[in-house]
Image: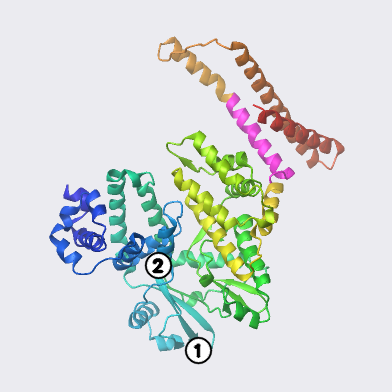
Amino acid sequence: MIRETVGHLRDLPRYRQILTTLVKYGYQDVVSALHLEGLVRPFERAALGDSVPPQDRACRLRMVLEELGPTFVKLGQLLSTRPDLLPEAYIAELAILRTDVRPFPFEQVEAILVEDYGRPVSEVFAELDPVPVASASISQVHRAVLHDRRIVALKIRRPEIVKVVKADLDIVKNLAQLVERHIPTLATYRPISLAREFERTLWRELDFSTERRTIQRCRHQFASDPSAHIPSVFEEFSTPRVIAMEFIGGVAIDDLDGIREMGIEPEAVAVTGARILLRQIFELGFFHADPHPGNLRVLPGGVIAPLDYGMFGRLDLPSRERISDLLMGLLAQDTDRVIRALEALDVRGEPLDARDFRRDLAELVSAYSELSLEAIELGPLLHELIGFVRVHHLHIPPELVLLIRSLVTIESVGRNLDPRFDIAGQLEPFLRSLAVRRFRPARVLHQTIRTAEDIQRIATLLPDVLSQSLESIRRGEMRVTFDLQDFSHLVRQLTRAANTLAVGIVIAGLFVASSVVYREGPHPLAYTGFIAGIVLAFWLAWNMSRT
């Protein structure tokens, strides 16, 4: 039993530290619910002490995570990005963990650099500022000057953090199992799945080689875009624990006075910043997942320089198209379109009352029906959608959560720069481009060929499947019950399905034959085949939508 509860004997002191910290800040009910009070009871009096924890439960949770160290601080930061899981009060409190992290001593910084470079720091850098420029849960950044006078930003991983994280992650996963088993109200949020996602995210951030590749990928993607500046990486001064990159000056994107002093209009900065992020999301499918003001700098000429490449989201083309459908449905107040998009994005709940779900979603969408597109604020709309998701206990894919967070953040940044900033107007060309892209002839042809291949494969397998089914029926291994009620309706449906299949095969044949003719040269017969195929495809789509 001890092994099941604490995993391994060596983790017992850390378990006690975690549990006594929970008791110290008034979370005895959680410890009791997990049936772990026996581990902490001998230390409970010492844990409680004479101090009185704050009344606010969200504040106490933040203090617990701060006291437990880097892994739990990072857990709090991750939870601060999940409004689908936690109420707004907790989100706001845990967001403090993203900006208020104590730095580690400069002596440890020097020790890491000497160990990784194999020589004294003075031989590598002409100057090294002992005061960090920024400090986070995993690393901190110091400004340094090379002997050739180039200025670099050194991102240095916290000492021994990999060892600490490895031990803590085992504990977090074990506690998640206990939560799912013993606390039904939290089990609906699938804590085991969340713990695994947290583990994957944290290991990815600890791997500085991944972040270096991300920077290089972004530099390549924006090489021809003068409005974005991606810092260069100095590979010769980078190690598994250190990233040496170009030091970015400029001013913070929320420093309106500093922006105006450079002769730049804040309104133009808002548009440029939004365009860069929206291009990452909807064109590239590889986007900055933490674009808060501390991670965005403005350079002369209104150039935007994103910082910190540790947290990036990834979206394939089908996901981007489904998200486009969701946003277009929200902005157009189209409830059916929103429902279809949520289903396609695998936003589901178990169990789900379909009638209440549709009614509440229709109410949410209709609340914006009197507003013009320019008057709709996407941030509040997405916040309401997240509240709807939480009420109905829906599960959101992690990448969709990152996307919503990025959109909400960039709109907030834009509104700070320009109170009249219209994120919907900036979104429109990207969403329209995705919609047009679906019907490009090359893509329609590709999908048609794939459909024809699927039909051919099904037709090839069908005789064997029928033969095996009939043999199973003959041996008594399968029972077939016929219900002839409303048989005529069934016949009509089967006839319609057969006709649909036949038209689909004709469409596929037209596209394939036209493509073969087109390869021999631009013959009118090829264009006629393509046009006929497209017309039939639209008719088929319309006909299928009536079922």
The residue nearer to you, when weighing 95 against 11, is: 95
Residue 83 visible in the picture = yes
In the displayed structure image, the side of residue 199 where residue 279 appears, left or right: right
Upstream in sequence: badge 2 or badge 1: 2
Q: Quadrant of residue 257?
A: bottom right
Q: Quadrant of residue 279?
A: bottom right
Which quadrant holds the C terminus?
top right
Give the residue type at disc 2.
Answer: Leu
Tell me residue 339's x, y (percent). Answer: 57, 40
Q: Which label number is shown at residue 147?
A: 1
Residue at 63% of width from left, 19% of height from top? 493
Which of the two discs, 2 and 1, sits closer to the camera? 2
Distance in Å between CA atoms under marks 2 and 1: 36 Å
Residue 49 place in picture, x, y as percent: 18, 68
Label 2, secondary structure: give it.
helix
Q: Residue at x 64, y 48 (%)?
A: 328
- Badge 1 element: loop
Per the rendered image, the range of residues in magenta is 438-459
Residue 260 shown left or right of residue 515 in the figure = left
Q: Amino acid at mark 1?
A: His
Rendered location of residue 361, percent (x, y): 55, 42
- Asked if residue 136 is positioned above or below residue 542 in the image, the reply reads below
Nearer to the camera, 39 or 115: 39
Asked whether residue 7 appears in the rendered view, the answer is: no
**Residue wearing tag 2:** 97
Residue 451, magenta (yes or no): yes
Sort mark 2 into few (<14), some (14-19) or many (20+) by Cα contacts within 10 Å: many
Give percent across and percent down for residue 89: 42, 59
